[in-house]
Image (tube, rainbow, N blue to C red):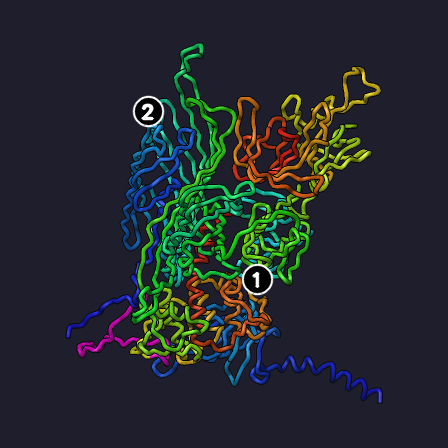
């Protein structure tokens, strides 16, 4: 019995070897191994061209096999010609009779590889949450993509941090791998994304050949009201311009039939011209409302303001942070100016202008503004005592000590001597003293305004005396111009200014341009301290001010 | 009857011979022009000064060479500045055409130069100009795509021996050119160094000349773009044989932006503070209008693809005089192939059939690439040219199956081959994002991937590509019109707006 078992096992063990030794691709109907070469016998008058492949099997046997004229020739599943094969390629062939009917070779080392950065998604940011970026893509699709610490953010070619992104920003997202949603690089559209002007007037000629609109009796929306601009205005419009009336889209070629009707036009500065991006023709009667959104219903597309329900729609012009936005940015409690069209209780919002603005552009930002006494300064950190922090646009006091960190890249401005000082000078100077044990009793701790990113100080402005923060207020607006006044030095004219009312907890639109001093002020753009003359017309500012005197200015 | 060979251009379009031209935008100064006026900004004095005037551009193109000459006569736009520019530059371009690879290398050489800039009392004379520029042009059936690199140096003498200004610039350009549009966008980085000796000011103690030097940078973004769009226009009269028709509108626009970083200059002396700013220039040509044929089809009214079918009919893409288009009938492979060739204005060499009895025995009859398409077939030349350009390859080595119904996979593959975009797909061994990726034939997978990436196709409501579904004539029309829009608009945005607005 034992002999039988041993014999059976031996036979079973030998069978595969016998099979390999006697492997016949013509019988098996397939062959695999290495391609030795492809040979082509030219056609003669009697015989057609013959193409054959010499293949070495994995077992080391060589076969010269004719390739059928209709054979499927593939490399990595892609159809090719016989001339694409290279000797040494691993191949797999299927045979019918004595001919190869399929010959597939393998070549790709890194499957599904794309050049880093060659996958592109383009569109407008609709939301920024944590490390997630929600995008309305240019192709009409939506997507959620992820920002990592390695993500490079470029704004007009200059590298910036991800917290400078806004909803409403037009971006190009680049990815390094075919199936990743982790963004490798973000390019952000520059100033051309900002709304330049909002015009109102009677629609004149619409020239679809030159893409020009003529507006008559033109008014411009400035400082919360319509102000006379000119008798006529000829202005180009974008081919992608959105046009609506009574919440319905106006076909491009029908615009000319609205001649004489009142229209609202939003323009953006695009390639050297102010171009109309959004147009709404007034359908019935105009009314304007300012206040807080008390209730918001996205399902019914209704917002409540001042106990009035107003419908909004896809074509409503929504402006926030100087950018055209999707109406998804609307939220309960937002302070808005609404320009409505309709009558009685049946009104639709043609324009919704959102005033709210904070230090941070989105939840990605962790910037804060502090004010307080410099209790202690060491080589790379400082302690503020009894400090104040700007919280939701109002100073909040803390009877505590706050430790913050600074470094060689921190901008430190001495407002008394009106010069930038180094971190070493800051540490070695008399900006913080032990008041109980100081040799010169005149020496006292200095006070500072600090702009921080988390607990890292980006900019400090130091001064000998503390300002009264009670009288300070927060103002936002858009730069009209910056002038070097012989009487008061550098000063700023601000348009569309809004003050935050601490009593009403509401942004209040100012109805006139605002003039502010820029002397001894800390002006911060993209995390860097800049001079007043570097401010550009049209830039949006977040300002901490004491009446006429600006204290901290953040370029948004 | 005499034996003759006549080479005719097919289609109703006004054909332009695809050629590669240098200097669109004109030269490398960031200047813009329309039919009437040219303008550019000049920085040699350390202060940005806008000049306006005339430009005369002459091109001379031969088979493998071209020369382009620019002649400028400009004065400052600000009348308070006294000045002028007289400049003549001629470049020669040598083309090395690699027809086997479908690519062309263009090498630009400077032939002659002469330039004098007068700004107030200072005269800047171009004493030396060196330039090296090379472009590669990928000649694809539906469009040429190009990319170039440039480096150059200009040396100006100030008032003969008072000093010199050295303008070093380098950068590159990208462009495309097809029947429906062309754009070239330059990004140039200028580095300007000036050293001069100026008379001492009256309040200085000695009368020796004062050495003045300054350095500045200017980034120039310049773009010249042409596109042809189709527009529908109503017929204002009611009692007419037609209600409206399409026209083809050709627009051309130049734009440039100068971002400069220079010293503030006072009486020719630089201060320590910097003058940073941006200047934008824009000029448009008068649009060119071409009215097109009137579509008179009885069965497309109210159809979802009515507008697309009408556009293609106006372009004479669909032949025949039948009043019925049959929008929901299947599109055949031959119809789609010829439609793409015509819509993209891909040139086809039409050869008259050789009917003469004088044909010698040695003259071999032309052999069709496919057994099922005869050389006498009216669409033969389109098929032959499509094969030559690699747009089609047949269902097998010998057969094209011209009357077979067109599938989406076949249509998408033809379009991607016409663009030459198949190579933009990942290396093999990937899956597309379509839910029915498994049903996409391997030979069209790259095309589907790229077509989705560039926004030419989308999945249906269930994100299926439906690659093996037959396309109706209406669906094929919509796809062709979308393809034309890609050639006209999408490429323009990518090569112009997306570069300028993001840089």
Same chain check for tags 1 and 2: no
* Numbered range of the magenta stretch: B345-373
Image mark 1: chain: A
Q: Is residue A67 above or below residue A476?
A: below
The outermost residue toward the top is: B205
Does residue B448 appear in the picture of this structure? Answer: yes
Image mark 2: chain: B
Mark 2, residue position: B160
Label 2 Cα neighbours within 10 Å, binned few <14 / some 14-19 / many ≥20: few
Q: Is residue A126 above or below residue A460?
A: below
- Which one is nearer the viewer's eye here, A331 or A419? A331
Instruction: Mark 1 and mark 2 in contact? Answer it, CB < 8 Å.
Output: no
Does residue A117 appear in the picture of this structure? Answer: no
Where on the picture, by quarter, is residue B33? top left
The label on residue A141 is 1
Where on the picture, by quarter, is residue B177? bottom left
């Amino acid at each position: 019995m034992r002999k039988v078992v041993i014999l059976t096992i031996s036979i079973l063990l030998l069978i595969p070897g016998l099979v390999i030794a006697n492997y016949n691709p013509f019988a098996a109907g397939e062959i695999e191994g290495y391609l030795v070469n492809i040979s082509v016998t030219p056609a003669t008058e009697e015989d057609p061209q013959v193409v054959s492949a010499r293949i070495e099997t994995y077992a080391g046997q060589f076969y010269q096999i004719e390739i059928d004229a209709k054979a499927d020739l593939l490399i990595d599943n892609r159809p090719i010609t016989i001339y694409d094969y290279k000797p040494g390629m691993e191949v797999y062939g299927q045979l019918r009779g004595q001919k190869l009917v399929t010959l597939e070779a393998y070549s790709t080392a890194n499957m599904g590889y794309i050049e880093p950065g060659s996958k592109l998604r383009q569109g407008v940011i609709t939301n920024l949450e944590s490390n997630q970026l929600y995008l309305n893509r240019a192709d009409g699709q939506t997507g959620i993509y992820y920002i990592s610490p390695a993500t490079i953010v470029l704004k007009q070619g200059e590298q910036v941090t991800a917290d400078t992104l806004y909803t409403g920003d037009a971006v190009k997202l680049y990815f390094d791998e075919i199936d990743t949603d982790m963004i490798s690089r973000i390019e952000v559209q520059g100033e051309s994304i900002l709304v330049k002007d909002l015009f109102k007037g009677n629609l004149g000629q619409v020239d679809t050949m030159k893409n020009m609109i003529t507006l008559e009796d033109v008014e411009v929306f400035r400082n919360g009201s319509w102000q006379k601009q000119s008798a006529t205005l000829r202005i180009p419009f974008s081919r992608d311009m959105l046009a609506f009336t009574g919440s319905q889209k106006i076909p491009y070629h029908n615009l000319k039939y609205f001649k004489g009707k009142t229209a609202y036009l939003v323009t953006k500065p695009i390639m050297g011209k102010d171009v109309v991006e959004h147009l709404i023709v007034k359908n019935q009667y105009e009314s304007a409302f300012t206040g807080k959104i008390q209730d918001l219903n996205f399902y019914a597309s209704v917002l409540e303001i001042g106990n009035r329900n107003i419908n909004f729609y896809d074509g409503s012009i929504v402006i926030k942070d100087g950018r055209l936005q999707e109406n998804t940015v609307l939220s309960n409690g937002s302070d808005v100016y609404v320009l409505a069209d309709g009558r009685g209780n049946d009104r639709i919002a043609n324009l919704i202008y959102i005033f709210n603005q904070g230090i941070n552009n989105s939840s990605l930002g962790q910037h804060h503004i502090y004010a307080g006494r410099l209790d202690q300064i060491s080589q790379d950190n400082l302690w503020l005592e009894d400090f104040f922090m700007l919280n939701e646009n109002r100073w909040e006091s803390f009877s505590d000590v706050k430790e913050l960190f600074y470094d060689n890249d921190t901008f430190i401005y001495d407002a008394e001597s009106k010069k930038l000082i180094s971190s070493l000078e800051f540490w070695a100077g008399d900006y913080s003293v032990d008041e109980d044990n100081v040799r010169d009793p005149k020496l006292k701790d200095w006070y500072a305004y600090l702009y921080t990113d988390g607990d890292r100080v980006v900019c400090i402005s130091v001064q000998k005396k503390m300002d009264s923060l009670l009288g300070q207020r927060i103002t936002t607006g858009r730069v009209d111009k910056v002038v070097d006044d012989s009487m008061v030095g550098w000063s700023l004219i601000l348009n569309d200014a809004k003050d935050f009312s601490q009593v009403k907890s509401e942004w209040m639109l100012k109805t006139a341009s605002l003039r502010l001093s820029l002397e001894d002020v800390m002006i911060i753009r993209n995390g860097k301290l800049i001079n007043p003359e570097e401010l550009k017309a049209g830039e949006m500012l977040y300002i901490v001010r004491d009446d006429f005197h600006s204290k901290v200015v953040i370029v948004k | 009857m005499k034996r003759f060979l006549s080479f005719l251009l097919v289609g109703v379009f006004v054909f332009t011979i695809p050629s590669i031209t240098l200097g669109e935008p004109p030269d490398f100064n960031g200047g813009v022009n329309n039919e009437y006026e040219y303008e550019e900004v000049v920085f040699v004095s350390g202060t940005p000064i806008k000049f306006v005037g005339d430009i005369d551009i002459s091109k001379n193109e031969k088979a493998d060479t071209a020369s382009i000459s620019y002649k400028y006569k400009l004065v400052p736009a600000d009348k308070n500045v006294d000045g002028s520019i007289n400049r003549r530059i001629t470049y020669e371009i040598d083309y090395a055409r690699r027809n086997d690879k479908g690519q062309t290398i263009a090498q630009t050489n400077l032939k002659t130069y002469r330039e004098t800039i007068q700004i107030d009392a200072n005269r800047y004379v171009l004493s030396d100009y060196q330039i090296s520029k090379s472009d590669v042009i990928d000649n694809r059936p539906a469009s040429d795509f190009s990319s170039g690199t440039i480096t150059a140096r200009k040396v100006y003498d100030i008032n003969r021996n008072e000093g010199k200004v050295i303008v070093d610039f380098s950068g590159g350009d990208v462009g495309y050119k097809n029947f429906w549009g062309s754009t070239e966008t330059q990004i140039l980085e200028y580095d300007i160094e000036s050293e001069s000796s100026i008379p001492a000011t009256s309040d200085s103690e000695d009368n020796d000349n004062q050495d003045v030097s300054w350095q500045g940078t200017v980034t120039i973004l310049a773009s010249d773009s042409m596109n042809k769009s189709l527009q529908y226009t109503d017929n204002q009269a009611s009692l007419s044989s037609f209600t409206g028709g399409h026209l083809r509108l050709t627009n051309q626009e130049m734009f440039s932006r100068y971002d400069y970083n220079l010293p503030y200059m006072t009486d020719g002396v630089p201060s320590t503070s910097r003058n940073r700013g941006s200047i934008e220039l824009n000029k448009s040509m008068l649009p060119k209008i071409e009215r097109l044929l009137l579509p008179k089809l009885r069965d497309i009214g109210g159809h979802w693809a009515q507008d697309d079918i009408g556009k293609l009919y106006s372009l004479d893409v669909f032949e025949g005089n039948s009043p019925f288009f049959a929008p929901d009938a299947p599109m055949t492979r031959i119809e789609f192939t010829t439609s793409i060739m015509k819509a993209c204005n891909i040139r086809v060499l039409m050869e008259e059939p050789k009917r003469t009895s004088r044909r010698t025995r040695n003259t071999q009859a032309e052999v069709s690439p496919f057994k099922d398409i005869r050389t006498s077939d009216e669409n033969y030349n389109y098929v032959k040219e499509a094969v030559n350009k690699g747009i089609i390859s047949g269902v097998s080595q010998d057969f094209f199956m011209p009357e077979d119904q067109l599938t989406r996979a076949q249509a998408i593959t033809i379009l991607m081959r016409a663009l030459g975009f198949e190579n933009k797909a990942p290396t093999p061994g990937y899956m597309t994002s379509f839910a029915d990726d498994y049903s996409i034939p391997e030979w069209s997978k790259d095309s589907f991937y790229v077509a989705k990436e560039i926004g030419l196709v989308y999945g249906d409501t269930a994100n299926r590509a439906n690659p093996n579904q037959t396309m109706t004539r209406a669906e094929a029309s919509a796809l062709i019109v979308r393809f034309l829009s890609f050639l006209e608009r999408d490429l323009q945005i990518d090569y112009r707006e997306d570069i300028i607005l993001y840089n």
